[in-house]
């Protein structure tokens, strides 16, 4: 069985980060090891959340894993909260990198043109450096614009703009760059990626569903890294991930609650699991 290590916070309520990565990666038939970087009562879009930083656990945990000779087929990082965490996780990646394993970085820090609470441009610059260590990065358009110091363009852009953005992301150093939330027409949304090793571009578009939901980026990345670890191609993996997010949003629309509570990915899990039969 493949083993993925995922490094991100535990937001106890508000389906995102580890509480979605663990069930989704496990459902794909992959052992999921976790390195929780912090515990929050909820994600940061609720008011008054608690926060317990676990940065001081990163080095001792990694040291123990090294002593035990533990290896990972992929390392997937999501929300990381500080410069210090980025530096420590860079060391961890250097220590656990093998010839064959996959380093998958979701530079979680912003959406819809805005940085999340607690992040600033300096953090985005540091995250851009962190991305150089990755095989695959999956920023949304907002995260890409902060990392590249380019204006956030909400809707009116064409394929050339996206291709240019992918080129600039590749120049940061990752082998594969994937942009999420791309839209060339009001009724569609999708993902476009570029693999600098093969010079291949891939793209997948689907109908745009109503509304913006919290945690969909984490659902998407968890599904994509799982599919890649299960040996699916880049194109297939990102299609599986996009379809899974759509199915989860559809399930949420069918049974609405507050958007802060994330999407009902649980309802969509049986369809996701079938992709690996
Ligand atoms: O879903 C991204 C995310 C993860 N973890 C925490 C967050 C957010 C987005 O706001 O606040 C703690």
Image (tube, rainbow, N blue to C red):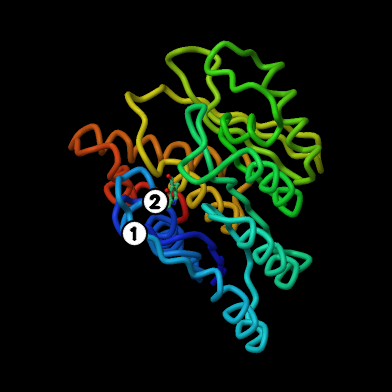
Q: In the rendering, which numbered label is found on residue 16?
A: 2
Q: Where is residue 274 in the image (x, y as percent from the top left)?
A: 40, 51
Specify which label sits upstream in the sequence, 2 or 1.
2
Give the side of residue 209 with respect to residue 149, left or right.
Answer: left
Total of numbered circles in the picture? 2
The residue under the point 64% across, 21% down is 151
Is ligand 1 closer than 8 angstroms to the Cβ of mark 1? Answer: no
Q: In the rendering, which numbered label is found on residue 50?
A: 1
Label 2 element class: loop
Q: Quadrant of the N terminus?
A: bottom right
Estimate the spatial distance between the alpha carbons at disc 2 and disc 1, rounded to whole Å: 16 Å
- Determine whether 69 is above or below 256 in the image: below
Is ligand 1 closer than 8 angstroms to the Cβ of mark 2? Answer: yes
- Determine whether 180 is above or below 138 in the image: above
116 and 69: which is toward the camera:
116
- Determine whether 74 is above or below 200 in the image: below
- The reply to whether callout 2 and callout 1 are in contact (CB within 8 Å) is no
Q: In which quarter of the image is the C terminus?
A: bottom left
Q: Is residue 32 visible?
A: no
């Amino acid at each position: 069985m493949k083993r993925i290590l995922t490094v991100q916070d535990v937001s106890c309520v508000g389906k995102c980060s580890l509480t979605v990565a663990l069930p989704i990666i496990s459902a794909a038939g992959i052992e999921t090891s976790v390195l929780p970087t912090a515990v929050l009562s909820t994600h940061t879009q609720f008011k008054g959340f608690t926060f317990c930083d676990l940065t001081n656990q990163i080095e001792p945990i990694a040291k123990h894993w090294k002593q035990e000779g533990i290896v990972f087929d992929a390392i997937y990082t999501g929300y990381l909260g500080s410069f210090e965490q980025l530096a420590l996780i860079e060391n961890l990646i250097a220590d656990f990198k093998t010839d064959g394993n996959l380093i998958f970085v979701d530079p979680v820090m912003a959406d819809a043109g805005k940085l999340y609470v607690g992040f600033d441009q300096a953090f985005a610059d540091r995250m851009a450096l962190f991305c150089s260590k990755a095989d695959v990065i999956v920023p949304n358009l907002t995260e890409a614009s902060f990392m590249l110091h380019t204006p956030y363009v909400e809707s009116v852009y064409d394929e050339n703009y996206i291709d240019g953005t992918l080129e600039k992301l590749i120049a940061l150093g990752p082998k594969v760059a994937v942009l999420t939330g791309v839209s060339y027409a009001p009724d569609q949304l999708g993902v476009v990626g570029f693999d600098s090793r093969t010079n291949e571009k891939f793209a997948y578009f689907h109908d745009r569903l109503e509304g913006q939901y919290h945690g969909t980026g984490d659902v998407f990345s968890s599904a994509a890294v799982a599919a890649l670890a299960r040996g699916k191609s880049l194109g297939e993996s990102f299609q599986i991930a996009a379809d899974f997010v759509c199915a989860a949003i559809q399930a949420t629309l069918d049974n609405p609650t507050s958007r802060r509570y994330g999407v009902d990915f649980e309802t969509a899990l049986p369809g996701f699991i079938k992709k690996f039969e």
